[in-house]
Image: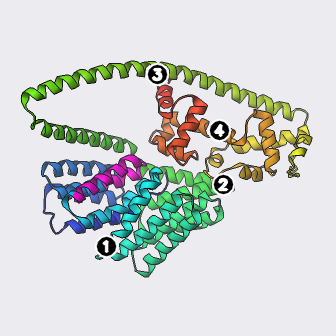
Amino acid sequence: MLMQDYLRRLCIVVLLILTATATWGGTKARQLTDQASALYKADRLSDALDMYISALKTAVEEDDKQSQMICYCDIGIIYDAFGDYLTSTDSFLRAYEVAAGMGDASAQANLLPNIVVGFCRLGDMENAHRYYEMEKRNVSREKYDYWQYYVYYNEARICTAEKNYEQAIAAHRRAEDYARRRGMDDHYLLYQQSEIGNIYVKTGHYDEAIALGHRCEDEARRLGSGELLVNAYKMLTDAYAMTGCQSQADRYRELYVALNDSVYNQRKFNDARFHHAQLEDRLKTAHIEELDHRLSRGAWLTISVSVLLAVLGVFSIVIARKNRHLRQAQMLLIEKNRQLAEQSQRQREMLGSYLNGTDAQTEDMEQPADATRQATMTPDAAALLLKRILSVMSDPNIISNPDFNQQTLATMVKSNTSYVSWVINETYGKNFKTLLNEYRINEACRRLTDTDHFGHFTIQAIYESVGYNNANSFIRAFKRVCGMTPSVYQQLARQNE
């Protein structure tokens, strides 16, 4: 899980609280919100979410709009930390809607940075740019320093989402320098360094990522920030794995998993999310009831019966189609498992036939890249190259890097892209991109059903962990390989267990 916008967003929450102080009385909702804020600062995110939901419920009962706005914002922050970006962005938009209803322009301006980042995470760059332009126009005169800092920050996040990494690093540097010159808290500096380190990992600058990761680790310890320390551990895990320092990668992976489980208590988070869903259902029901009172009793009865009959009819059709779809998907799952087993056997047989009679040469295979000479590779050289390709492709830590490509593979196996492409085509009858997608999807299948290690991961977190940057490309690749969507695969696999 990548580093979340803990300090950036916490600052926005503080600004909102300061903005609301003048009109926000000592209500019960405010007391609950203060308790939730204390839990959040103590890195007890799941407990904080549950408390914020209770505060939101109370704020609705008290018709306390200021408290509702604060709760929606903070709930969005916590959902973001758990990787549920859709619910997170929806919560920020709900807070913005409440602020607009109150005519609180200052609160609206403070919420815009969160909304921009939310749309960046969802890959909705059209809305990200639209709200970013709104952010730049809504200058906060009272808190100009923070406004300018977030303008630099969101420029960097948009560049990162669009893979303009050099511009992103430059914008992060501007934000860092600005915070330093303005004497802002060290957390603001550290967050920019953490983001730059994450970009170094994405762009293959692993030595720089390791050096910066250790500095972030030390600084996060000094500041006592659990989330920033989680990010430092993740950065070091990925960077060491890509440089081949497996012992160091394993060490930091253990630290990352232990601290991540401490900060993100998935069981409590699921409980809190269930309570949130219940509350939203009650709020929707209350809204419907309010509309109902405007209708006459006879008209309402007629509408209710009509709607009920329509819903029952649609429900029956949906259930019938779903059952038929599940039966078809289950057959696809069985066929997919059979194909995976056959593919694994074919790979072993191919590798064995290539290696039969060879002395497992160890010399490099860097040869001229002229495609006309590919067919001149000796069986021994082809076998050794295939062995190296399989070794690299079988390592999830390597192929899960979003920037891993055929050139990277060729460099790692000490050959060139022409020979690598030829061996892959001769062995599998497919190109490198297709083979990479199959390996990534197979790893995603394993993680979707590994509840012991990945049970607390959302599907979005899983596809990001195996190298996909957006849901659409992952779902297309998954359906091409498995014949069904990831959610259906996960559901059927667990039923078969």
Q: Is residue 74 left or right of residue 432?
A: left
Closer to the camera, 480 or 456?
480
Is residue 98 rendered magenta in the image? yes
Label 4, on which residue?
439
Q: Is residue 439 above or below residue 161?
A: above
Label 3, on which residue?
325
- Disc 3 to disc 2, C-alpha distance: 41 Å
SS at circle 1 = loop
Q: Horizontal and vertical percent for residue 383? A: 84, 38
Judge depth for marks 3 and 4 and give the one in front: 3
Label 1, on which residue?
140
Circle nearer the N terminus (1, 4): 1
Judge depth for marks 3 and 2 and give the one in front: 3
Instruction: Say if residue 384 shows up in the picture.
Output: yes
Amino acid type, label 1: Ser
Q: Which secondary structure is most common in the magenta stretch? A: helix
Q: Residue at x 73, y 43 (%)?
A: 391
Circle nearer the N terminus (3, 4): 3
* Mark drawn on residue 175: none
- Disc 3 to disc 1, C-alpha distance: 53 Å
Judge depth for marks 1 and 2 and give the one in front: 1
Circle nearer the N terminus (4, 2): 2
Amino acid type, label 4: Tyr
Q: Is residue 331 left or right of residue 294?
A: right
